[in-house]
Image (cartoon, rainbow, N blue to C red):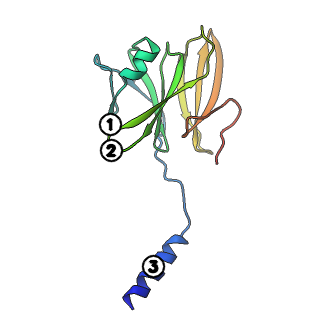
Amino acid sequence: MLRYFFILLFVFSACLPKTYFNQSFSSSEKVPITTDGYIALPSGEAFDASIILNEEKTTPKDINIVKVHGTYILAADGFRNIWAIFPASGDKGKVKRLTLLKENERLSDVQFEVSSKSRCVIMKFQTDGSPHSVFIDRDGDIDEKRCDDD
């Protein structure tokens, strides 16, 4: 009898409606970078950004970061790329470079906004004084016009 109860419980739980678990910050964070290349978030999480800083060949004073459904998206003034950090096993993460700019362009005035109607972030920035915005989803995919909500 107990076995039937667990089978029914399993079937019932599989039929429950599902929702997206919001793991995004309500707004982006601007956090300092330590002298040894670490980024420490207010939540207590920290990670080594030296790989990113070496690729960018610059160390800004601070960096803009937002978490969208488990993935960190980050950029800083003076960077050429946007970066996504995905959770991997244990305390490791995978880093993905999101290239958007031409060779001689650099990001400035970087800001992230979480889209309330979709599961992505809107990144607003400038290059050579010209404003731009793009949508970035949790997979690190960039679209200039909209967010693909799966």
* Secondary-structure class at tag 2: loop
The amino acid type found where label 3 is placed reads Leu
Query: Which residue is the site of mark 1?
Result: 45
Comparing marks 1 and 2, which lies closer to the viewer?
Answer: 2
Reading the image, the residue beneath label 2 is: 90
Q: For the point 60% across and 35% down, which residue is it? A: 141
Q: How crowded is mark 2: few (under 14 residues within 10 Å), some or many (20 or more)?
A: few
| Label whose residue precedes the other's in the sequence (1 or 2) | 1
Q: Sort mark 3 into few (<14), some (14-19) or many (20+) by Cα contacts within 10 Å.
A: few
Mark 1 → mark 2, Cα distance in angstroms: 13 Å
Q: In this view, does 122 lie to the left or right of 38?
A: right
Query: Decide: marks 3, 2 in contact (CB < 8 A)?
Result: no
Mark nearer the N terminus (1 vs 3): 3
Residue indicated by mark 3: 9
Establish if 55 lies above or below 116.
above
The amino acid pointed to by label 1 is Glu
Placement of the N terminus among the 4 image quadrants? bottom left
Disc 1/disc 3 C-alpha distance (Å) = 36 Å
